[in-house]
Each structure stands twice: as structure tokens, then as C-alpha cells.
Amino acid sequence: MWKEQEKKPIIPYLLLTFGISWGAELLCILLERLQVLPSNLEQLIIMSIIALFGALAPGMAVYILLKKHGKITDMKGYIKRVFACENKKNLVFGIIISFAIFGLLIIATEETNPECPFYLILPIFIVMIPGGGWEELGWRGFLQPALEERFGFIRGTALLGVIWSVWHLPLWLIQCANQKNFVFWAFAVYCIAFSFLLAMTYQITQCVLAPILLHAWGNTMCGGVFTYHILENGPSILGWILLAGMIVLACIVNQVHQHASK
């Protein structure tokens, strides 16, 4: 979205992203505390606000900044810039590899969710594209390359994982949000490790569509058709090994990709 070596508005991006999402989630917290609406209607409104102004905030921030800096004139230009993909073979390869790696991690560490049979994978996956995947318009579409350029791949990706996890914090104060079941430190570890896989996918494909789909796949598998004990209790010994392996693999792929690009 921004050219290499071009100054990137990281601070304005973070202020916009946190301001939009945290402002919306503060409204949700107030609605719950005031209890002025019937419970079913209140929950529907809160989940709609989270979906519209929470999950979409990173992409909204990028759109605002692209328009402010004169890089786009309308939504069509934004979509064209975001979903540009020069190598469709790499896109398919990156999606298959990253889906397989994350799928193996969850299968090895989690149990099948009896309340969510496997035939619901596709419907859940489709719902999770806007219900989480759209975040990648900002996180990997803008912030990953911006931080990576300034701090390098490892430190930039780890920092993004920390920012991403902290960005979710207000959800722990909303009773109808899933995060109330999670331990924050475990969620942060998961976000940091998952950030490396998402960054690796973006490196392979150079297309934001790939991390969007991977993010949706992650939400579908962990907490969808499989349990999310890794977020409720923290990783098991095997979980720690696999998460560390995922980070190491992502770093190796990045090195290979950089070497091949020279």
C-alpha cells in the first residue's frame, strides 16, 4: 500500500485503529452496565457494534489514511490496492501451506467441539472472514510491512503480535464476548505466535487476501470445530513446542524469501 522506504504513518494508523475500536467497545460496555435494553436485543446490538467497528477498525484506518495521503479516491481503488496479487500460484501455495500448519497445530493440541460438527466448517469459515479476517487489511496489509521495515522481521512481527493482543483488551470487559473465557497472557502468546504464521503467509504471497483467509481459518478451527483450551488455560507442553516451531519456521521462510528476492 505504501512503497518501500516511503514514510509510513504508523502512529496515526494506531491512533485511528485503537480509537475506532476502543470507542465502539466502550459504548458496548456502557450498554451492558446501564441495562436499558432487553437482554436479547442488547446482545444483538453489542455483537453488531463489535463486528462493524471492532473487527473492521484496522481496515477502516488504512482506508482513511490512504485517502488522506491521496493514494486512492474511492472504495474501488482501495479494494484494487488491497487485493492486488501478482503471483496467483504463490497465493494458492501460501494458503495451502499456512492452513495445513495451523490445522495440524490445533488438531494436535485441541479436542473436537461436540457443539460444532465438522459439516459447519464452511459456514463458520465464511462468517469468520468479516468476523476477524478483515482485521488483516490493517495488521498485515499495512502495519506488518511498516514495522518490519523499521525493526526487522522478528522484532516487527513480535511487536505487532503484542499490539494485536492489547487491541483486544476491552473485550474482556464485555460479558457476551468470547474473550471473557480466555486468560489474557495465553491469548497474547497465541497472538504473537499466530502473527508469525500470518506474516510468513504474507511474505510468500505478497497479497493481503492470504492472511485474511488464514485469520478466518484460525478462528474457524480454534474455538469453532475444535476447543480453545490453549486460550483458556495456556499452551500445553506440546502446544509450546508447536507454537515455537511455528515461529522458527516463519523466520526461516522469511530468510529464504529475502534471499530469493535479491
Image (cartoon, rainbow, N blue to C red):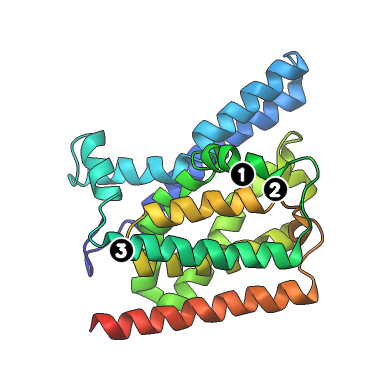
Question: What residue did someone put label 3 on?
Answer: 89
Q: Give how far apart the Cα atoms at labels 2 and 3 are.
A: 29 Å
Q: Where is residue 28 in the image (x, y as percent from the top left)?
A: 65, 29
Disc 1 designates what residue?
121
Q: Mark 2 points at which residue?
A: 225
In the picture, the disc for residue 138 is none
Label 1 and label 3: CA atoms lie apart by: 25 Å
Q: How many labels does the image show?
A: 3
For the residue labelled by badge 2, is the local secondary structure a helix, a strand or a loop? Answer: loop
Does residue 40 lie above or below 234 as drawn?
above
Q: What residue type is labelled 1?
A: Ile
Q: Which residue is drawn at 61% across and 55% down?
A: 166
Relative placement, left or right, of 14 versus 121 is: left
Question: Residue at 58% across / 27% down in the picture?
Answer: 48
User: Disc 3 on helix, strand or loop?
Assistant: helix
Of the residues shown, which amino acid type is indicated by label 3? Lys
Closer-to-camera residue (187/242): 242
- Give the farthest residue toward the front: 119
Residue 244 horizontal/vertical position (percent)? 63, 78
The x and y percentages for residue 151 are: 41, 76
Q: Marks 1 and 3: CB-CB under 8 Å? A: no
Callout 1: SS: helix
Badge 2 local density, few (<14 within 10 Å), some, or many (20+)? many
> Residue 146 in the image: x percent, y percent?
35, 64
Q: Nearer the viewer, residue 257 or 98?
A: 98
Q: In which quarter of the image is residue 80?
A: top left
Closest to the observer: 224 or 160? 224
